[in-house]
């Protein structure tokens, strides 16, 4: 059969028979990947069903595959604290403001370093790369934040990390790969400046990498609590993660104090069981916003990861 005839033969949709070894290989791979999926997914599933189960059943180890004694006690205890909703609001403000500032700093920097005509870009890139491996440390950073009068403000949680070097490199690679110099030269002929080209052409064509940076930066801001622990002393400005941490610490401290001063062992045991369920409820509450956001940008996630891994 000639080459052209073979191509026509395949174009008609002829099914290629697979040998027995290929089928066995596929079966083994399927079993291995299924086991890995179960190993990864089951702990997450267990946290979810435990948050809805009776505290006694959870402590006794009876919750395995489904909720037992369905209850919302853990969630009720969490939301009974007014600081949770205040922490939600603070976390949203910090995350949204932080992501906008991150994008405002990262995208122009990445675009500038991606252009071949930008003089000294290797030196500037090396300057940024150094910060990936060396930092000033906690105390010098704290002194800088204090001297800038940023303590006890949202800016202390946003400005010190307004540029992620890895994210900038990923964005720079995207611009190098997808925004060609020929495109700029064609726009330049029509009188387009670098600024106009960036805002009117490069940014509209960068939806994929923008979505990836929103995910990276957003998750970072949402999950961060250590910076707030260091720089924020006003409880009304605590983000959600710090509020949830304090709820657990306060409850456990109160329980420990009661254990040394009270004889009601049964009441203490029930309180400890409820605290255990609250931990799972807190995990779900803090994870819901990210889980809601991820499906909308999931299709861009793999592309963004590949951009950063293929060419740095």
Image (cartoon, helix red, strand yellow):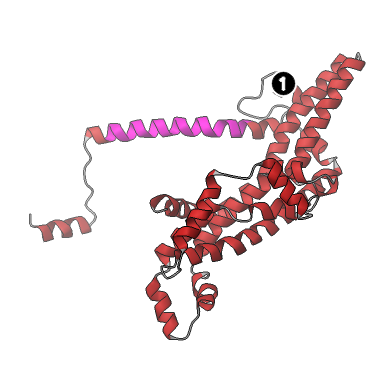
Kindly indicate the quadrant of the structure image that contains residue 177. Answer: bottom left
Quick check: can you spot residue 205?
yes
Q: Where 110 falls versus 18 (above or below)?
A: below
Read off the magenta span: 23-46
Residue plotted at (76% across, 38% down): 244
Residue at far left of view = 1
Kindly indicate the quadrant of the structure image that contains residue 178. Answer: bottom left
Magenta span: chief secondary structure: helix
Image-based side of 27 in relation to 90, left or right = left
Q: Where 219 falls versus 252 (above or below)?
A: below
Residue plotted at (80% across, 44% down): 84
Q: Secondary structure at mark 1?
A: helix
**Residue 282 drawn at (x, y percent):** 72, 37
Whether the magenta-drawn stretch holds residue 24 is answered as: yes
Provide the residue designation for mark 1.
59
Q: Nearer the viewer, residue 223 or 11?
A: 223
Quick check: can you spot residue 171?
no
Image-based side of 27 in relation to 176, left or right = left
**Residue 48 drawn at (x, y percent):** 65, 35
Kindly indicate the quadrant of the structure image that contains residue 135. Answer: top right
**Residue 131 drawn at (x, y percent):** 55, 49
């Amino acid at each position: 059969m000639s080459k052209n005839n073979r191509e026509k033969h395949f174009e008609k949709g002829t099914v290629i028979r697979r040998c027995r070894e290929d089928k066995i290989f596929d079966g083994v791979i399927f079993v291995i990947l299924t086991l890995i999926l179960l190993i990864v997914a089951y702990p997450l599933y267990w946290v979810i069903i435990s948050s809805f189960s009776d505290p006694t059943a959870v402590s006794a180890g009876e919750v395995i595959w489904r909720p037992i004694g369905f209850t919302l006690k853990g969630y009720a205890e969490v939301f009974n604290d007014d600081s949770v909703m205040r922490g939600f609001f603070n976390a949203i403000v910090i995350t949204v403001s932080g992501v906008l500032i991150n994008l405002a700093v990262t995208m122009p920097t990445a675009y500038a370093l991606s252009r071949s005509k930008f003089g000294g870009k290797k030196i500037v890139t090396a300057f940024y790369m150094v910060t990936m491996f060396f930092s000033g440390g906690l105390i010098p950073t704290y002194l800088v934040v204090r001297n800038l009068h940023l303590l006890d403000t949202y800016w202390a949680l946003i400005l010190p990390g307004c540029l992620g070097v890895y994210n900038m490199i990923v964005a720079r690679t995207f611009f190098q790969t997808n925004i060609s110099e020929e495109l700029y030269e064609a726009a330049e002929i029509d009188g387009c400046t670098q600024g106009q080209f960036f805002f009117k052409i490069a940014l509209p064509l960068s939806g994929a990498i923008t979505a990836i940076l929103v995910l990276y930066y957003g998750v970072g801001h949402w999950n961060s609590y250590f910076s707030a622990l260091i720089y924020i002393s006003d409880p009304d400005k605590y983000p959600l993660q710090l509020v949830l941490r304090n709820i657990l610490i306060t409850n456990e401290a109160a329980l420990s104090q009661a254990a040394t001063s009270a004889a009601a062992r049964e009441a203490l045991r029930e309180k400890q069981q409820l605290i255990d369920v609250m931990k799972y409820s807190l995990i779900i509450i803090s994870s819901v916003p990210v889980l809601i956001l991820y499906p909308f940008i999931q299709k861009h996630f793999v592309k963004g990861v590949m951009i950063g891994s293929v060419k740095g």
